[in-house]
Image (cartoon, coloured by chain):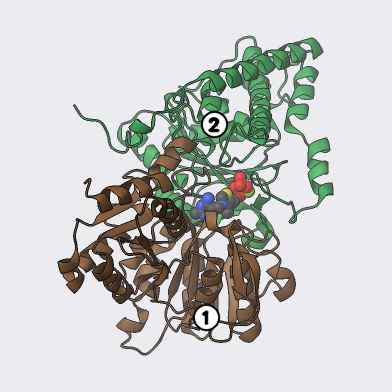
Amino acid sequence: MSATAKKGAAKKDGANQPFIYRQFDQDKLRDALRKMYLIRQFEEGAEESYMRGLIHGTMHLSIGQEASAVGICLGLSDEDQITSTHRGHGHCIAKGADVSRMFAEFFGKTTGYCRGRGGSMHIADVSTGNLGANGIVGGGLPIAVGAALTAKKMKTGNVVVCFFGDGANNEGAFHEALNMAAIWKLPVVFVCENNGYGMSTSVARATAVPNIADRASAYAMPGVIVDGNVVSDVAEAMHEATERARNGEGPTLLECKTYRYRGHSKSDRNRYRTKEEIEEWMTERDPIEAFESQLMEFGVIDQNGIEEIRESVRKEIEAGIEFAKESPMPEVANLEKYVYTEQA
Amino acid sequence: MDAQVETATRELSYAQAIQEAMAIAMERDERVFLMGEDIGVYGGAFQVTGDLVERFGPDRVMDTPISELGGAGVAVGAAVTGMRPIFEFQFSDFATLAMEQIVNQAAKMRYMLGGAVSVPVVMRFPAGSGTGAAAQHSQSLEAWLGHVPGLKVIQPATPHDAKGMLLAAIEDPDPVMIYEHKILYKMKGEVPEGYYTVPIGKAEVRREGADLTIVATSIMVHKSLDAAKQLAEEGIDVEVIDLRTVRPMDRQTIIESVCKTSRLMCVYEGVKTLGVGAEISAMIAESEAFDYLDAPVVRLGGAETPIPYNPELEKATVPQVDGIVKAARELVTGAR
Ligand SMILES: Cc1ncc(C[n+]2csc(CCOP(=O)(O)OP(=O)(O)O)c2C)c(N)n1
Ligand SMILES: [Mg+2]
């Protein structure tokens, strides 16, 4: 089921190669880097369009968290499903969405993934297994468990990944969902992207345990902590959790420690953290820079190859924004469409 | 008439007026404290609590985890046992996660215990559309709570009333839910200095008129007043009533007005069907004002859809000034 392949695996063999170099071929790894660029440049493009008044509403950027989205989705197929969060652009792209249709959604156009009804906070591409971003913190947790219940009942062999933030672990839905997933041994992986803060509230101030993964013991499932800025570490832990899920052994709680560079949403005075803290993460732990140098070190790509991918991503982003601008607006006459299912 | 000790006034925004009310209440009464998500250093999602944490400290301006059900319940528990909590939902939509504590506990505790306790909790609900935040951040669900005996539900439309009604809510021995339209937060108006209250359960006639009564809530009061101005130029004289309180409803003010004008239109942002306007219409149909009606009652409410993201669709979802003008004109000239 999972898109794993070993043929043409990266050079520098040996058991001490990081996981992804043993697990995936070089094209797959270069594609992972491409997706990371795509996420970052998509969000930079969205941010700029927002500043220029082309996009309204609000948006939550995941710049700095790309390794987690990409590492988690690396081994998934389109049939495997995810539930996403308000900070969900990266998940959507990592799962395979087309950035043109994402931009179109942000511009409120009919060609957008939600036909202009959802916007950034509800971005979804059901065709690649993304059941949607969510405006409600913790809202996706039980839904992911329900999707995993379907997978089990219908014996599809699919896994479901539930993305959520550190802040979400204090919602009742989190606890109820983990418990049910555990008692029914459902094929779901709970992926907490711990970026240190829920809006302005640090994990230390909001959560009684030091790690979100510590919650796992209350629900008798493995709780795994990884450096969420290292693609290979994320992918490796995810691989184990996925195997477990597909083998009917039940859920895993996987915590990716990461950091968001931007403010919580469009308005944020960053009063709850220091400039130094932000700068340290940006300069010393950037997930894209780290992945670039690792790929070069293992001979998967060189500087020219990097430039080529960056350039092609730049073009894809430009074309996406152009597509969004030129797409038509929905008609007010269709306001009440999609409230209920159209029936013949 | 409303105010008890009114002094000088100055211009404040609606958000500032609420902040001032909370500050005054905390100064007057040690039992008053604030709870909510990101209301401390962040100042609240809409900057309503602002810098209050600097003035009153984190023990009285308490950031909660993202736990609406638990947080609201803690506020209820503190209220029952002698404190005076003011609980902020970051968006009114998230109160759906706390319905259990609001509806089953706060509203009913006094009754179930035969009057042995009361629940003096205040909850604040930033509501409404117009910000592009789409379906889960734009709702107007005040009618839900208006359906629950034991709760009081208020919707101040001006900075003056926001401050005065919030102070009245804090004094009130029972749970008071205050719906604040997000678009009104930046609206400015004259606000008296110092302590005063505006009574819960009293509507206010914002404009007198002879041809038609519009009963509006929250932001729709302002849209209706704008519409009334335009209609006046056509010779249509509209009376605009600001409902101010959804529960308990001020029936008398509405009945008297309809007896005078013989026409009624209800304008509110919540979904039209089974909303505040349904209650007002039914109440008039049951009252002596029914015999005075010269035309069917008209309701203008939100469309039967979640709030869409696209700005044009979003606007089309809730009543706008043009629509109010058109509907009022048709009602008065008998075109409908
Ligand atoms: C039920 C609910 N409560 C509050 C909010 C407002 N809100 C949106 S995102 C957010 C912080 C979420 O923090 P976390 O889960 O850590 O995700 P992050 O934003 O850090 O990615 C809050 C409080 C919401 N959308 N839904
Ligand atoms: Mg977080």
Chain (brown): B
The quadrant in which residue B108 appears is bottom left
Label 2 to label 1: alpha-carbon separation: 44 Å
Q: Which structural element holds mark 1?
A: loop
The quadrant in which residue A150 appears is top left
Residue pointed to by mark 2: A106
Residue A125 screen position, x and y as percent: 46, 28
Compared across the picture, whether A135 is left or right of A270 comes to left
Chain (green): A
Nearer to us in this view, B31 or B128: B128
Nearer to us in this view, B82 or A239: B82
Q: Is residue A218 above or below residue A239?
A: below
Residue A247 screen position, x and y as percent: 44, 33
Q: Is residue A197 visible?
A: yes
Q: Is residue A331 above or below residue B134?
A: above
Amino acid at pointer 2: Phe
Q: Kindly report which numbered mark, 2 or 1, lies closer to the viewer in this rendering.
A: 1
Q: Which structural element holds mark 2?
A: helix
**Which residue lies at the image location 34% right of the left edge and 60% below the top edge?**
B214
Q: Is residue B240 above or below residue A88?
A: below
The quadrant in which residue A22 appears is top right
**Which residue lies at the image location 73% right of the left edge and 13% below the top edge?**
A11
Furthest-left residue in this view: B291
Amino acid at pointer 1: Thr
Residue A331 screen position, x and y as percent: 39, 29
Given contact means CB atoms under 8 Å apart, are the residues at marks 2 and 1 in contact? Answer: no
Nearer to us in this view, A146 or B148: B148
Write down the chain letter for disc 2.
A
Mark 2 and mark 1 on one chain: no
Residue pointed to by mark 1: B197
Number of other residues with Cα within 10 Å of mark 1, as a class: few under 14, some 14 to 19, many 20 or more: many
